[in-house]
């Protein structure tokens, strides 16, 4: 209070006595101009080296570069006894390699202002490093060491085991539901969880990680991709990746078969999480685009934050049966390279689950009837899908992952414009046909939580 009064007193005494002048603009010839390099955008370029390694890049003239190595070595390739190995691999970034200590890996990444991460799904492992253009090369060198020459020292593996154990303890019910769903739906690798089973956490050893990596980390199964980098630079760095990856012959491709089934995991509580699906088309199927549009016809949850999302077809059907909005529902479309899952996933109060599940299943059955899908609904769904694709492509990580997967599946990866054109080509008849094909298939159901009021699969179909 005293300091405020003193400041006001001084301000009043100076009023009218002090004049403030504008700072004159410095002469143009004494202003140092920053030497900022300019980069020209270049189209997507894909090259396959003699050793089978795919190299792909997009020069987007960004000051930040992202480079990654994608490996066709996801959880679906885990054999008996190796369940959870990929979960350990994606937590094993900051470990010692043949060239440097684990502490040095972290220090060098931080010193160069880079970020390095590893993500995984059921089919791929994605190693990525991000940094400015003048430091990305150092980041690439570190990432390459982590991918090609890890040691997995036994004393360091204790840290990885702790990270995996923490991941398992913090998994949300929605994530666990998806693992239950895949286990019930598939026979083969796609039934494997992307998370290490709790019973196997203490069984994954460094020898197993070496064996898994050496059997799958082979150049024909790998893509070296870059966003915001020059194509020639990528080719130069790709040729520096050690050729010692091909050690154990040819990797055996994993096949999975959709079989359908039911999984019930009671855990108590007030809520229930459930999903009902049938077999959907794979990424390379001619029906993939139609299925993606059908997902948006049925509804993918609220488009406005904190809104109940009752404008979707599924939302309206369940709300009409319930009379309230105490639930969350979304259509599910999970395509893989050779097959997929399509249906819906829902969460709600345990006592409401019978009404919710019956209303949603009834709406899915209704969509197969003639004239049930209008041209207007398809147009709206296509617009939503194209917006989602655009927003996904705002992330360089998403672009890199898309480019990697497409490069490993086809000789000519689809670009953003190709994806939008494919969506535009889908007609209402295409969506109706794929709806009949998918929804009339053999069902799979998974549920967890309080299952006292949750119907069984036989009650819904």
Image: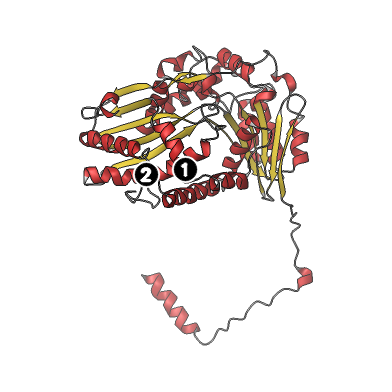
In front here: 117 or 389?
A: 389
Q: Quadrant of residue 367?
A: top left
Q: Quadrant of the C terminus?
A: top left
Question: Is residue 115 visible in the rendered structure shown here?
Answer: no
The colour style of the image is secondary structure
Give the image location of residue 37, x and y in percent. 75, 54
Q: Secondary structure at mark 2?
A: loop
Give the image location of residue 139, x and y in percent. 67, 36
Q: Quadrant of the N terminus?
A: bottom left
- Determine which residue is flagged by label 1: 429
User: Please, which residue is most extreme toward the front here?
Assistant: 370
Give the image location of residue 451, x and y in percent. 24, 27
In front here: 411 or 217?
A: 411
User: Callout 1: few (<14), some (14-19), or many (20+) C-alpha neighbours within 10 Å?
Assistant: some
Q: Which mark is residue 372?
A: 2
**In the image, what residue occupies the spot 75% across and 63% down?**
33
Q: Secondary structure at mark 1?
A: helix
Residue 326 horizontal side relative to residue 34, left or right: left
Give the image location of residue 394, x and y in percent. 56, 48
Question: Is residue 278 visible in the rendered structure shown here?
Answer: yes
Vertical relation: 303 (above or below) 233 = below
Q: Quadrant of residue 187?
A: top left
Asked whether the residues under the numbered discs 2 and 1 touch, taking CB atoms below 8 Å apart as contact, a structural biologist would say: no
């Amino acid at each position: 209070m005293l300091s405020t009064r003193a400041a006001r007193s001084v301000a009043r005494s100076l009023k009218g006595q002090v004049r403030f002048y504008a700072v004159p603009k410095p002469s143009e010839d004494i202003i140092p101009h920053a030497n900022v390099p300019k980069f020209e955008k270049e189209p997507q370029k894909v090259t396959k080296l003699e050793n089978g390694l795919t190299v792909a890049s997009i020069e987007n003239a960004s000051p930040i570069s992202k480079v990654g190595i994608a490996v066709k070595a996801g959880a679906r390739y885990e054999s008996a006894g190796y369940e959870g190995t990929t979960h350990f691999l994606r937590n094993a970034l900051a470990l010692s390699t043949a060239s440097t200590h684990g502490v040095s890996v972290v220090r060098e990444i931080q010193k160069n202002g880079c970020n390095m991460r590893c993500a995984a799904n059921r089919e791929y492992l994605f190693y990525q490093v991000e940094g400015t253009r003048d430091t990305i090369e150092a980041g690439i060198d570190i990432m390459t060491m982590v991918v090609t020459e890890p040691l997995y020292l036994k004393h360091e593996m204790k840290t990885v085991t702790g990270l995996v154990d923490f991941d398992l303890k913090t998994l949300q019910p929605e994530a666990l539901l998806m693992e239950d769903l895949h286990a019930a739906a598939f026979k083969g690798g796609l039934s494997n969880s992307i998370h290490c089973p709790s019973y196997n956490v203490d069984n994954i050893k460094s020898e197993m990680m070496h064996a898994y990596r050496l059997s799958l980390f082979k150049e024909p199964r790998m893509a070296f991709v870059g966003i915001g980098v020059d194509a020639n630079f990528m080719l130069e760095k790709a040729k520096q990746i050690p050729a010692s990856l091909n050690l154990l012959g040819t990797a055996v491709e994993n096949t999975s078969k959709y079989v359908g089934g039911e999984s019930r995991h009671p855990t108590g509580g007030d809520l229930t999480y459930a999903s009902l699906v049938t077999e959907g088309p794979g990424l390379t199927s001619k029906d993939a685009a139609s299925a993606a549009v059908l997902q948006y016809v049925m509804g993918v949850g609220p488009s406005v934050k904190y809104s109940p999302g009752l404008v979707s077809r599924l939302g309206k059907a369940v709300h009409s049966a319930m009379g309230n909005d105490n639930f969350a529902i979304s259509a599910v479309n999970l395509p893989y390279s050779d097959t997929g899952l399509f249906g819906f996933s829902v969460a709600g109060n345990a006592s409401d689950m019978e009404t919710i599940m019956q209303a949603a299943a009834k709406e899915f059955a209704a969509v197969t009837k003639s004239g049930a899908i209008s041209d207007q609904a398809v147009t709206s769904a296509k617009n939503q899908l194209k917006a989602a694709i655009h927003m996904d492509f705002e992330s360089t990580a998403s672009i890199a992952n898309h480019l990697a997967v497409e490069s490993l599946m086809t000789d000519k990866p689809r670009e953003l414009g190709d994806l939008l054109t494919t969506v535009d080509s889908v007609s209402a008849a295409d969506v109706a046909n794929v709806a009949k094909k998918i929804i009339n298939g053999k069902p799979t159901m998974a549920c967890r939580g309080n299952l006292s009021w949750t119907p069984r699969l036989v009650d819904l179909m």
